[in-house]
Amino acid sequence: MDDKNADGGEMSPAAIVIRFRPTNPESVLAWAQKEHRRTGYFRLSVFADVAGPGEDDDAVIQRLLDASELAGVDPGGNKKFYVCTNASELLGLGFTFHKDEEEGESSEHWSVDIGADPSGDDALRFLSPFGPPEGRRR
């Protein structure tokens, strides 16, 4: 598992990042702990990518929402999502992006490592670059 994307490049600092619930630090930390028990890493799932030719931010966000549905995120149970407009904000806080390298993983899916022994403060730091909840657009 590394921080390379599907075409061999690293996470672009310009990528738009979206995430879903949980939204409070305690629940985020609990989710990362659950992932640690499964994989050995304290990581949180996000969807991220840069704009393609002719895409604006809204088009990228819609593409990420579509990718999340294909990856099994139920839109009925995840009506709201949270946007970080630049991956550089998370990278600047010391977080790293990794591919899970699981069969069928979309190029837009990433896991953000929140540290070797994260605390509630780390979970809060992870949440800080994400804006207020937004509703699905379709």
Image: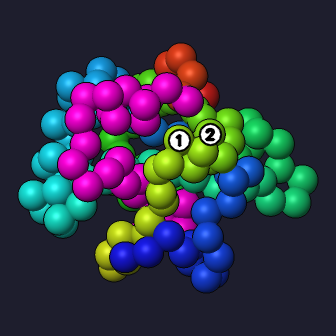
Which image quarter: residue 137?
top right
Q: CA distance from mark 1 to mark 2?
A: 7 Å
Name which quarter of the figure residue 29 lies in: top left
Residue at the image position 33 percent from the left and 33 percent from the top = 123
Q: Is residue 27 visible?
A: yes
Q: Looking at numbered disc 2 in the image, what kind of residue is underneath it?
A: Glu
SS class, disc 2: helix
Residue at screen point 73% across, 36% down: 58
Which sits in the foreground, 20 or 69?
20
Q: Position of residue 107 (x, y in %)?
A: 54, 68
Please state, as top left, top right, bottom left or bottom right, where the C terminus lies in the image.
top right
From the viewer's perspective, tell me whether residue 104 is left or right of residue 52: left
Asked if residue 38 is positioned above or below residue 81 in the image, the reply reads below
**In the image, is residue 25 part of the stretch drawn in magenta?**
no
Residue 45 at x, y = what percent? 37, 50
Q: Quadrant of the N terminus?
A: bottom left
Identify the magenta region. 104-129
Q: Amino acid at mark 1?
A: Leu
80 vs 38, left or right, is: right
Q: Within 10 angstroms of label 1, few (less than 14), some, or many (20 or more) residues?
A: some
Relative image position of residue 113 (x, y in whole percent):
37, 54
Q: Which residue matches tag 2?
A: 89
Snapshot quadrant of residue 37: bottom left
- 1 and 2 marks in contact (CB < 8 Å): yes
The crowd level at tag 2 (other Cα within 10 Å; few <14, some 14-19, many 20+) is some
Q: Residue at x 65, y 76 (%)?
A: 9
Q: Nearer the viewer, residue 54 or 1?
A: 1
Report x, y in % for residue 4: 54, 75
**Please, what secondary structure does the residue beneath circle 1 have?**
loop
* Residue tagged 1: 93
Res. 68 mark: none
